């Protein structure tokens, strides 16, 4: 049938099973929005307050559901406002399709009004990107974009469409999307045999879980693998939930703000099995001194990650879930009781601690975990609150922590929580923010209020840029250069003005009742929690130091004596 480009785009979105898109209209996408109006009963469009919020919402939707998230923006500033969200998705391997409009083909390259080369701008931060100048190529381009976004290591794809393409007509024929198969052709038998040999010879094995295990949905296979190897487990920020955070074999997060048990165990182990992890600098600390007693086995879908940051002894390239299935079928049950007992004792003797006498981030998060029974989706911004959310909420299943791990995007979590709620409407969704992060995209509270999206925004309001201040305290002689937020913004009044319900917490005794009230309301809620400016995230590894030099506040005081 003969359809306009806009009609073809919407039909292709329906082909792909898209039920929700996030965006902001403008001149170059008017034809697209006119068509979305005609299909509003089939595709729900969420108008965000800013295009960046749309990109983060699409990202949060994708992380929470495993489906491809979709966002739409107009040309020029609309398109460039998506860039941070696209980069965030790229760094954390999130499947997303960003659709932008551009000026008509005759106006391209002439510095036309609201023209920008968004294809060139986003080239380094997308898996692939396109500019469509011919309506006959539109349908195939959209289909390719979705396939690329979710194949192998997922990531964002951008499709830029010239405005006249959305009005021109072409023949359209519905195509059923092909099922994306897991990447298994790269799994080599000799690599499997080499891995099995390393595992069988290990006396002190350790399993390190990254975001790839979450993306591949390998939590069941991972649990069996842990039992067969008989090894303690640590994870990265992105790996949380792939392995049950309440399991006795779980030692906590690894790296700069990882637990002592995890950091010291990785340093002592003789085999480190990295599953879907990229060895970020925040995990390894001094890479030359990382896991120096161990041989390293890396399992990853992306060959570019092998030997990129840390040299490995053996690797298996392929989908994590598929690799673990093969290893589980071939691996005999190992026994490392002495090593397990040693690590469990280390866990008991060096637990995470915080000051329980005052209202603090860790206390609020522990209460939140208790009240939600761990059955909530937690989004975060970036900073101290993010690390406390990683440390003190126990993620028991995948896709329950949504956070910007790679890019570290302040302002990510609020949009992401809105997207997550659309993707998982039956789940309690909470965004944990610092006051500095909340300022960045707080206008999305208006979005939540407009659509009555029942998300809970918890602001850890310590009146400073907490993580930057922590570094200034520890490494910059307490020179607090532009990190003090001592203005008079009232977040309760601000939230109420945007249409949300708001509470303020100033003492510990108010936490439980307020959290329960917020959940029961089933409406957009903002909770302003007044915290101490000098609270810090412990433990910590100094930048560039080996992870075995992890220290707590008590260690620091003893050293200063």
Image (cartoon, grey):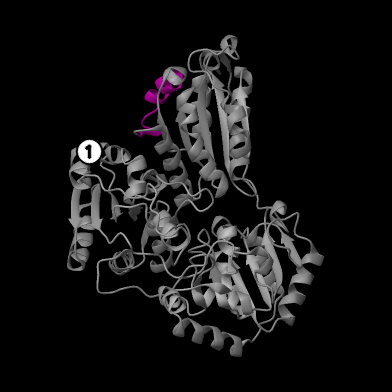
Up/down of 79 relative to 529, above or below: above
Q: Position of residue 153 (x, y in %)?
A: 63, 49
444 and 334: which is toward the camera: 444
Q: Is residue 558 visible?
A: yes
| Quarter of the image where one finds residue 449 | top left
Q: Residue at x 57, y 74 (%)?
A: 548
Range of magenta residues: 31-48
Is-magenta flag for residue 256?
Answer: no
Q: Position of residue 305 (x, y in %)?
A: 69, 55
Q: Quickly name the residue at label 1.
A: 498
Q: Residue at x 21, y 62 (%)?
A: 516
Is-magenta flag for residue 47?
Answer: yes
341 and 134: which is toward the camera: 341
Q: Residue at x 48, y 18 (%)?
A: 114
Q: Is residue 119 left or right of residue 504?
A: right
Q: Position of residue 469 (x, y in %)?
A: 39, 56
Q: Position of residue 341 (x, y in %)?
A: 54, 88
Q: Is residue 161 left or right of residue 453?
A: right
**Element type at mark 1:** loop
Label 1 packing within 10 angstroms: few (<14), some (14-19), many (20+): some
């Amino acid at each position: 049938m003969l359809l306009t480009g806009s009609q073809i785009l919407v039909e292709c979105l329906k082909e792909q099973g898209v039920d929700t898109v996030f965006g902001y209209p403008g001149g170059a996408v008017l034809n697209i929005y006119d068509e979305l109006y005609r299909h509003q009963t089939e595709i729900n469009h969420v108008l965000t307050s800013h295009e960046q919020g749309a990109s983060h919402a699409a990202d949060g939707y994708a992380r929470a559901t495993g489906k491809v998230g979709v966002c739409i923006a107009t040309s020029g500033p609309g398109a460039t406002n998506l860039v941070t969200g696209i980069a965030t998705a790229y760094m954390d391997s999130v499947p997303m399709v960003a659709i932008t409009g551009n000026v008509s083909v005759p106006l391209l390259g002439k510095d036309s009004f609201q023209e920008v080369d968004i294809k060139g701008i986003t080239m380094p931060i997308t898996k692939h990107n396109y500019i469509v100048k011919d309506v006959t190529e539109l349908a195939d381009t959209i289909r390719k974009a979705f396939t690329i976004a979710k194949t192998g290591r997922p990531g964002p794809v951008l499709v830029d469409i010239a405005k006249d393409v959305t009005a021109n007509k072409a023949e359209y024929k519905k195509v059923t999307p092909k099922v994306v198969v897991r990447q298994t052709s790269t799994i080599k038998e000799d690599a499997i045999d080499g891995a099995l040999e390393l595992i069988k010879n290990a006396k002190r094995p350790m399993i390190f879980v990254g975001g790839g295990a979450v993306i591949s949905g390998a939590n069941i296979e991972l649990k069996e693998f842990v039992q067969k190897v008989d090894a303690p487990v640590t994870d990265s920020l992105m790996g949380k939930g792939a392995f049950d955070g309440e399991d006795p074999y779980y030692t906590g997060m690894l790296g700069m703000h990882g637990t002592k048990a995890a950091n010291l165990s990785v340093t002592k182990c003789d085999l480190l099995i990295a599953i879907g992890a990229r060895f970020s600098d925040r995990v390894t600390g001094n890479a030359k001194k990382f896991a120096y007693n161990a041989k390293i086995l890396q399992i990853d879908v992306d060959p570019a990650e092998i030997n990129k940051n840390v040299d490995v002894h053996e690797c298996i390239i392929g989908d994590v879930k598929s690799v673990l299935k093969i290893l589980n079928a071939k691996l005999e049950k190992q026994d490392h009781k002495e090593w397990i007992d040693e690590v469990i004792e280390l866990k008991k003797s060096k637990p995470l601690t915080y000051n329980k006498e005052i209202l603090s981030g860790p206390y609020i998060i522990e209460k939140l975990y208790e009240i939600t029974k761990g059955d909530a989706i937690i989004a975060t911004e970036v900073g101290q609150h993010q690390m406390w959310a990683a440390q003190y909420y126990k993620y028991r299943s995948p896709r329950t922590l949504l956070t910007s791990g790679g890019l570290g995007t302040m302002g990510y979590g609020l949009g992401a929580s809105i997207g997550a709620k659309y993707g998982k409407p039956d789940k309690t969704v909470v965004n944990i923010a610092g006051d500095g992060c909340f300022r960045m995209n707080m206008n999305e509270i208006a979005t939540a209020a407009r659509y009555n999206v029942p998300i809970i925004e918890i602001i850890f309001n310590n009146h400073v840029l907490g993580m930057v201040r922590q570094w200034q305290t520890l490494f910059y002689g307490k020179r607090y250069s532009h990190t003090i937020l001592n203005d008079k913004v009232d977040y309760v009044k601000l939230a109420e003005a945007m249409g949300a319900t708001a509470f303020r917490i100033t003492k510990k005794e108010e936490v439980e009742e307020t959290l329960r009230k917020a959940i029961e309301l089933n409406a957009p809620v903002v909770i302003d929690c007044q915290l101490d400016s000098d609270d810090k995230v412990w433990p910590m590894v100094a930048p560039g130091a080996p992870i075995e030099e992890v220290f707590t506040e008590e260690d620091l005081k003893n050293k200063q004596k």
